Amino acid sequence: MNAPFPALLPTYNRTPLRFVRGAGSWLIEASGDRYLDLTSGIAVNALGHAHPALVEVLKAQAEALWHVSNLYAIPAQEALAEALVEHTFADTVFFTNSGTEAAELALKMVRKYWHDQGQQRPTILTFEGAFHGRSTGAIAAAGSEKMTKGFGPLMPGFKTLPWGDHDALRANLDETVAAVMIEPVQGEGGIRPLPDQCLKGLRDLCDQTGALLVLDEVQCGMGRTGRLFAHEWAGITPDVMMVAKGIGGGFPLGAVLATAKAAAAMTAGTHGSTYGGNPLACAVGAKVLEIMTTEGFLDGVSGKGALLRQRLEGLVANHPTLFEAVRGAGLMLGLKCRAPNTDIVKAAQAQHLLTVPAADNVIRLLPPLTISDEEIAEAMQRLDQAAKSLS
Ligand SMILES: *Cc1c(COP(=O)(O)O)cnc(C)c1O
């Protein structure tokens, strides 16, 4: 009770900003100070803060029904599953509350698939720099020292390959491989996109060996790159896909999407969730998807992404001692820094502009997909001020 230990488990190095309100692309402190938000809760508030249509649908659902067990049919859940099936490669969907839970089910689905095929496929291939969540399974999958140290024994069965090493992939992707799990654009790893050609090649290798292709689109999915899902740019489809973050627009929601073939072994009793597919989450999720699939929305994301990217290229050219390059797709952009990325994040914050650091000395720009051209111009002015304050 009186122990000198924080009441809140101190697993985060928190910035002392206390937001009490959000509106569109802005976060507001109790003092009234406004910050332009290029983080979107790390790609979560995809439609900005307090989007009126989301507030309305959440309020209406809250007045009707909050929760009912998955022992019963949940109409809002069925409707969202049908909409996702209509707009993607998937035949079927399971709802979770987070990306981590989606990763856990994806791993279980892969194992059960091969179990029911009667084949021994002990290995799942993953990649350096990956992030799939913080559960014991997800940290073992990503395999980084930083996340796994002290948490052993780790879940076995993963082999982590270097990012972008085609020879390593070809050498390891054989008939002992159950699945390959990969982010089409690494988020935490520093906005590292997998080139379309590589994703196509990976799909071919999986087809040749029977390995399932599991895409983690928790961060790069839900419109972030200018397509509903990032893999669409490569013209391929996965067998299994993890989704979360943007799908709930800020309400906790995740999902595993799969083909009938990959999912066939997941029969009644093989998986479950108390909250997964909760009526509140699914009502909001359905509205998010409806807005994102409205004619012109995703083209708008591409257009705004191109504008932001062009302005960032200019910033890099003007401050070559601070910045090295721009990378990413759509409104999932990374600035590869020469100066320490955390210094730049802090300097931007002093200009009331929020950005997120990532691995590989990158700062991430993940604005709401609804950001306006004027707000992009404002963000760039603040970023330029921040750069000037450092040089
Ligand atoms: C955030 C993230 C996760 C984990 O999602 P949580 O909702 O935090 O559990 C998994 N994969 C990727 C690519 C992510 O960005």
Image (cartoon, grey):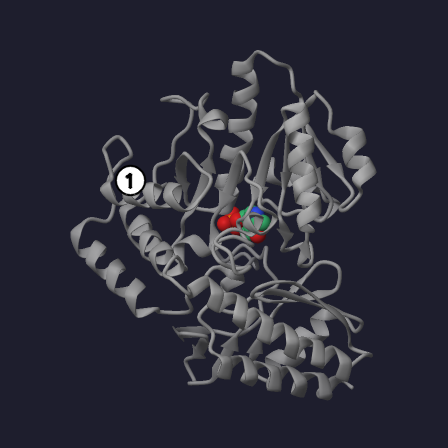
Q: Residue at x 24, y 64 (%)?
A: 56
Q: Residue at x 27, y 47 (%)?
A: 279
Quarter of the figure with residue 153? top right
Q: x and y percent of residue 198 in the render?
A: 71, 45
**Residue 153 visible in image:** no
Q: x and y percent of residue 175 in the render?
A: 70, 20
Quarter of the figure with residue 216? top right
Of all residues shown, which one is farthest toward the top? Answer: 118
Q: Residue at x 54, y 79 (%)?
A: 376
Of all residues shown, which one is farthest toward the left? Answer: 64
The answer to which of 202 and 51 lies nearer the viewer is: 202
Relative to 188, residue 148 above or below: above
Relative to 128, residue 111 above or below: above
Q: Quadrant of the C terminus?
A: bottom right
Relative to residue 315, is residue 272 drawn left or right? Answer: left
Q: x and y percent of residue 309 in the render?
A: 63, 72
Q: x and y percent of residue 256 in the render?
A: 46, 39
Regarding mark 1 in the picture, which secondary structure is present there? helix
Residue kind at label 1, given as amino acid type: Glu
Relative to residue 278, is residue 103 drawn left or right? Answer: right
The answer to which of 271 and 152 lies nearer the viewer is: 271
Q: Residue at x 46, y 27 (%)?
A: 263
The answer to which of 16 and 350 lies nearer the viewer is: 350
**Residue 354 visible in image:** yes
Relative to 58, residue 159 above or below: above
Reading the image, the residue beneath label 1 is 78
Quarter of the figure with residue 362? bottom right
Relative to 13, residue 92 above or below: above
